[in-house]
Image: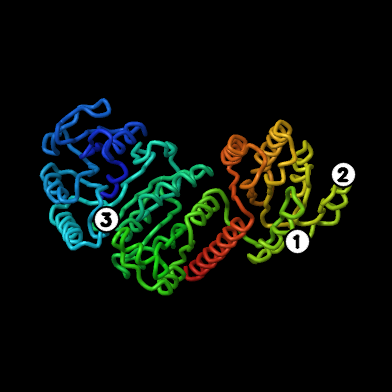
Amino acid sequence: MDRRLHQVFHPASVAVTGASPFKSGQLFLDSILASGYHGKVYAINSRGEEISGMQAYRSVADLPGPVDYLICCLPAQAVPQLIRDCATKQVKVVSIFTAGFAESGTQEGGRLEAEVAALARQTGVRVIGPNCLGAYCPASGLSFTADFPRETGKVSYACQSGGNSVYVTRAAAYRGVRFSKVLSYGNACDINECELLEYFAQDKETEIVALYIEGVCDGQRFFKALRELCEQKPVVVLKGGYTASGAETAASHTGALAGSDSVFDQLLHQTGAIRVYSLEELVDMLVALDKLPDLDGNRVGIFGGGGGASVLATDDWAGAGFVLPPLPGPARDKLRGMVSTEAGLILRNPLDLSSFAYSEGFYGLIKDLLTLDDFVDFSVIHIGFGQAAWFSTSVFDSEINLFRDAVARLQGQVNTPLIMVMQYLISGWDWNKGIEELQRGLAEAGVPVFYTMSSAAKTMARLLRFCERRRLRREEADIQA
């Protein structure tokens, strides 16, 4: 492992060049300062003027100490000389935010990128980008966005897009996932996806890997690196530009050359990577891998409120290949004695408890069901906030707190994995406040949350296939041993 890849995420010192007021350089500088970065921070601008309460230096050569990681916000034409200056100063890594290189489609942009790549090879200065946001590592306090969580986690994410790196990190963090490392690596003129996969395979702080990719620099090396990584850790891959039109857009975004999607799909299948097709699916998969143990069966129990939602849930889960076993006879008899008859109540699987789902008795009832031996392999609790429009806000606030606390208590007290589906896009309730509190409470309890039945079913089907393949590989390895 190149030690400078470690310094990408754990630099002892950071500098931002092009750190001028009200420009992108100041955004980077302020994000680093606000994120609790542990090392020394320097600002560089051509005037040497104060910025964000710091005295700036006029050039890299003027910095009073060594620099491990430098963020470049200079114009593209100035970047080659910056790399030379960084080599003289013995800067370890340069992250180039600047665009206007190969992705521009111009001859000059391509020439500049080729020059930067050649300088990286000649000088030994490692380059991230160009056209990227760089690194986020909560363990070191390094971040390109001030609102990312400071808590570290077990997911590492390599992303060729800056915006997609921000979206996935925020969306997954909102649902309780924490990251070990994130790298937005842009055009990949030096540090590329192959090297990152090799690094994550050796990194003890990484247990799950996510990859958003638009093109591959070296097909054979990529296949080898991905296969070896997948033998150790789950890897989720989102390929941007898998259609002909998407490939054209990818070329103008990061200069990526996207190959045949059918070949790429076969490659992912052979390596054992989990393929997804949208950012939302990528986040869903990270939630499942981060929060759930291995699945060992396809029997699902579905419990919650809403008759129509239960009918559609049956279609979603059965359509994804899952089996919904009937409630055991003794459980049905007990339910009839506990739950009063209401319009739409379904005492089977799915179990529609209507308003009983928001009562004091919900926790005990579901706990009894989920501790039955050999009933289901995992369970889904769902709530449809669109059905809550006929509740008064004050009543529903109280009832939803009971529901949240019941689900949080169930986590860890039942025999099978538990997931939550919160369907709240159409609602008469003020979900901006209440849903966020419910979401936060469930995430803190370690409950994986999904927003639609169809997305939950699709994600769990992928997780089940992954777990089955991993068990098969381990059994084959045991036999060979």
Amino acid type at circle 2 is Ser
Q: Considering the image in quadrants, where does the N terminus appear?
A: bottom left
Q: Secondary structure at mark 2?
A: loop
Q: Is the Cβ of the residue at disc 2 closer than 8 Å to that at disc 3?
A: no
Q: Nearer the viewer, residue 36 or 329?
A: 36
Marks counted in the figure total 3
Relative placement, left or right, of 449 versus 47 is: right
The residue under label 1 is which amino acid type? Answer: Pro
* Residue drawn 13% across the image and 41% down it: 89
Q: In the picture, residue 391 is in which quadrant?
A: top right
Mark 1 or mark 3: which comes first in sequence?
A: 3
For discs 1 and 2, the disc positioned in front in the rendered view: 2
In percent of width and height, residue 291 lies at 55, 48
Residue 325: give its label: 1
330 or 185: nearer the eye?
185
Task: Identify the disc placed on residue 191.
Answer: 3
Dot 1: within a 10 Å radius of its alpha carbon, few (fewer than 14), some, or many (20 or more) residues?
A: some
Residue located at (47% from left, 71% from top): 480
- Which quadrant would residue 329 be assigned to in this image? bottom right
Earlier sequence position, callout 2 versus callout 3 = 3
**Comes first in the chain, label 1 or label 2:** 1
Graded by Cα atoms within 10 Å as few (under 14), some (14 to 19) or many (20 or more), the crowding at tag 3 reads some
